[in-house]
Image (cartoon, rainbow, N blue to C red):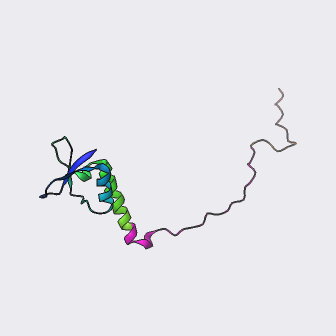
Amino acid sequence: MSWWVTVPGGQPLGPVSTESLLRGISAGKVPREALVCRVGDEEWSPLSGIQRFADAFAVRSLDRYVAAHPSDRPPFVEPETVEPRAPRSSAPPRGSAPPSRPRG
């Protein structure tokens, strides 16, 4: 799919592919305030209002936060080695018999 892209007060650029827009968002070259219009349409929409692009902005924000706050990352912990155990059985122990029936 191809899009026309602009920022408020700017000139439209394009057509630009969806993949190019996603790469631009990831690289920080496409601002959140950008507006887009699908080629062939007439209505402009906020880029961040389209789910696929909104998700790309969210990932970019998270990546920037993690890069700026490396101490917030949880420490890597080696998984414990657990010795395998035999499964527990719900059967009665060997040699035991069920209770006898009441006589009556």
Task: Using the rendered view, name the quadrant where residue 57 is placed.
Answer: bottom left
Q: Kindly give the residue lying farthest to the right in the view shown.
A: 95
Seen from this angle, which residue lies furthest front? 15
Left-right relation of 57 to 94 = left
- Main SS of the magenta part reads loop
Task: Give percent across and percent down for residue 87.
Answer: 73, 48
Number of dots carrying numbers: 0
Check the image and report above or below for 83 versus 88.
Answer: below
- The residue at 74%/48% (across/down) is 88
Q: Residue at x 38, y 64 (%)?
A: 63
Query: Could you tell whether 99 is left or right of 17 in the image?
Result: right
Highlighted range, magenta: 66-89
Give the quadrant of the C terminus: top right
In the picture, which quadrant includes the N terminus? Answer: top left
Residue located farthest toward the left when viewing the structure as drawn: 9
Is residue 87 part of the magenta span, yes or no? yes
73 horizontally vs 102: left or right: left
Q: 99 or 103: which is nearer to us?
A: 99
User: For this rendering, which residue is in front, 86 or 73?
Assistant: 73
84 in magenta: yes
Residue 31 point in image, percent of width and height: 24, 60
In the rendering, at what x and y percent does residue 68 appear? 37, 71
Given the current orientation, which residue lies at the most extreme top position?
Answer: 104
In front here: 31 or 58?
31
Name the residue: 16% across, 44% down: 43
Q: Residue at x 85, y 41 (%)?
A: 96
